[in-house]
Image (cartoon, rainbow, N blue to C red):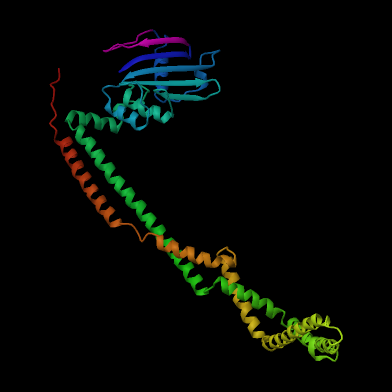
Amino acid sequence: MLKHLSIKDFVIVDRIELDFMPGFTMLTGETGAGKSILIDALMLTLGERGDASQIRLGCERAEINVIFDICRLPGLLNWLDENDLQGDPDSCLMRRIIETNGRSRGYINGHTVTLQQLRSAGECLLAIHSQHAHQSLLLKDAQRELLDAFSGCGDLARAVKTAYQNWQDCYQQRIAMERRAAESRDKREQLEWQLDELSALNFTHEEWQALQADHSRLSHVAALQAAAEMGVDVLSERENAVLAQINTVNGQLQNLLEYDSQLKTITDLLESAQIQLQESIYELKHYQQHLDLDPQVLQDIEQRLSAIHTTARKFRVTPEELPQLLENISQQLKTLGSGSDIGHLQTLETAAQAEYRKQAKELSTVRVNKPVKHYPCR
């Protein structure tokens, strides 16, 4: 029931406040007295569009406030609860403000709301019957509510609505699970393909280090061979080789030890140098003998390095990160769900659909077979 209407600076109205008592209320007056202005103001609070032209001349904004008693409207009370728009118990305060810059704001119980929310609440509160205004009797929802109220099956209609919502919830859950299952299958296929490719590469950190070392060595094998050959020649094979000169110096100092024992320290150091030098010459010869000059080996290493770099670019990582990537993909495959129980959801959906159809059929039967009382014409 409409309890209070307050209008400020709307069209030609400066300020007006009306309190409505229980029962039938009638507003009368001559044409132009402002009856339609009251209705227009009331409709603004119920979500009708407004503009700055409706603000009284010289004012900054128009404001309309309406209070309804909604104690007999459980549907609206539930809607307010669902949208977190509660206010005073059994009352609904609706407010609309229009400013000169064209902005419009709506409120329900002090909460900012959209025009659509104002309209949704308004449909439960008022029905305007006039030559040009919307008539709620033409709405299918309103017609069904009247039919169910007359048939006494309002509770059954609400039960049907709940059953239908339950069916739709099950349907949406099944669709969402099927979508997730499809995404999971696609993800699993992608991970399995990546795992197969990385496993086929059979790449490790140790191999990477060895390949780099071998490639660096074989890429400079000619220079290494020349250096080894020169080292052996300088140290031991040419006429004035280092080893021979050290031997000569050490031999002369050994012959003079009987004259000065202090030379003993020097000869000991030279003997150690002779031993170290001889070992170096041996290692150089051994290194030279085992230095691989086969170009095919270098080609094989370069092909292997190329395959590794190609795979790394494909997965957008560095070659060093490939082993960790392989481990991560393996873990993802282990943790990836094997799929959801879609069959269980399908069973629930089928049961919910059957329950809805059962109750809907019962409601339809009540609506059709409810006896209608005919009143004689007078």
Give left or right: position of 104 versus 130: right
Residue numbers of the magenta segment: 13-29
Query: Where on the picture, by quarter, is residue 297?
Result: bottom right
Q: Residue at x 47, y 68 (%)?
A: 195
Q: Please tell me which residue lies in front, 324 or 150.
A: 324
Q: Residue at x 27, y 21 (%)?
A: 71
Q: Please tell me which residue lies in front, 53 or 241.
A: 241
Q: Residue at x 85, y 90 (%)?
A: 255
Give left or right: position of 315 versus 80: right
The quarter of the image holding the C terminus is top left
Q: Position of residue 249 (x, y in %)?
A: 85, 86
239 vs 1: above or below: below
Q: Position of residue 240 (x, y in %)?
A: 86, 89
Query: Where on the picture, by quarter, is residue 277?
Result: bottom right
Q: Please tell me which residue lies in front, 38 or 206.
A: 206
Give left or right: position of 322 versus 120: right
